[in-house]
Amino acid sequence: MDRAQLADFLRRSRARLAPSDVGLAAGTRRRTPGLRREEVAQLAGMSADYYTRLEQSRGPRPSRQILGSLARALRLSEDERDHLFHLAGEEPPRAARDTGGADGAEHVRPGLLLVLDRLDDTPAQVVSDTGDVLAQNTMAAALVGDAASRPPGERNLVRRFFLDPEARELFPPGDRAEHARRHVAHLRAVLAARPEDARAAALVGELRCRSAEFASLWEEHEVGVRRADVKRFQHPVVGLMELECEVLLSAEHGQRLIVYTARPGSESYERLRLLRVVGLQDFVVR
């Protein structure tokens, strides 16, 4: 691990980003260019103290998960991400086609992140085809919860839906059975397309063992890839919202950009506008 060069690369990568580049408001006047350290830390889902120590050449070696999160937070290209891994003394992730969907597929291209950040008044997130939340804007974090605040193993939408009762509270009770069925049908389609994908197979194996509901639905052998949809969300602050879920596919990387919108003039539209205020306030508080 080259601590000095890692610290320098992090500082320079942070300095070249404006708040608007990552979907943040500029806020009060800034004495230096670029993002603040605490903003990078929050975007990467790590403590501000740990990130500060990395920039000061005195932090412990970051894990592969942390390096991947930093690459996304700093909007690094794949070459820059690989450089970051090398400086930390780690082998960069190989391409998804070489690993059967391993951590090479977790890198979100800067262009896709740029689209995500420009949607400042609309919830949007990038999700892998097996359900891992890879990036969110502030509005998505306000709508479905901040994935970056959870450990990497708990950022998978399918795992959380079947194993975490709290995750189901986001949806009205009458809608949950259909959500469960669609999750299973999509995951079966992914595993059939990539039977060598050890990660997807491990997720299915875990859920079949730990969730009787998942195991029962898996035996029904329904198949269906998730595409555009209409979902109802029972938000604890702003209430029930019916949102259009538009799914933009990135076939090369097995990633989906999901955008949530409401019909203009509807009650859900007004509640979505209120959610924006809630989300921005939450970011400032933290």
Image (cartoon, grey):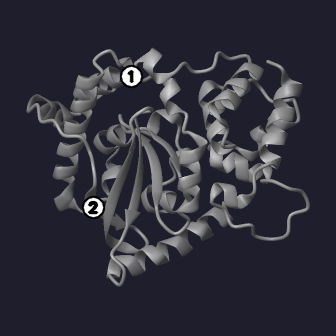
Amino acid on which the number 1 mark rests in the picture: Arg
x and y percentages locating residue 203 in the rendered image = 33, 27
Whether residue 53 is visible here, answered yes or no, is no
Q: Quadrant of the C terminus?
A: bottom right
x and y percentages locating residue 114 in the rendered image = 59, 52
Judged left or right of residue 100, residue 69 is right
Decide: is 197 above or below 238.
above
Please tell me which residue lies in front, 147 or 209.
147
Whether residue 226 is visible here, answered yes or no, is yes
x and y percentages locating residue 132 in the rendered image = 43, 38
Please tell me which residue lies in front, 177 or 79.
79
Q: Quadrant of the N terminus?
A: top right
Quarter holding residue 27: bottom right
Q: Residue at x 64, y 49 (%)?
A: 43
Dot 1 or dot 2: first in sequence order is 1
- Which residue position is annotated with label 1? 199
- Which residue position is annotated with label 2? 231
Q: Residue at x 72, y 59 (%)?
A: 19
Amino acid on which the number 2 mark rests in the picture: Lys
In the rendered structure, find residue 22 and report the number of the disc placed on it.
Answer: none
Please tell me which residue lies in front, 172 or 195.
195
Q: Residues within 10 Å of mark 1 (few under 14, many from 20)?
A: some
Instruction: State if disc 2 and disc 1 touch (CB < 8 Å).
Output: no
Q: Secondary structure at mark 1?
A: helix
Q: Residues within 10 Å of mark 2 (few under 14, many from 20)?
A: some
Quarter holding residue 235: bottom left
Q: Residue at x 73, y 19 (%)?
A: 86
Judged left or right of residue 235, residue 78 is right
Query: How many angstroms separate mark 1 from mark 2 (CA)?
Result: 27 Å
Quarter holding residue 260: bottom left
x and y percentages locating residue 202 in the rendered image = 34, 21
Decide: is 10 above or below 200.
below
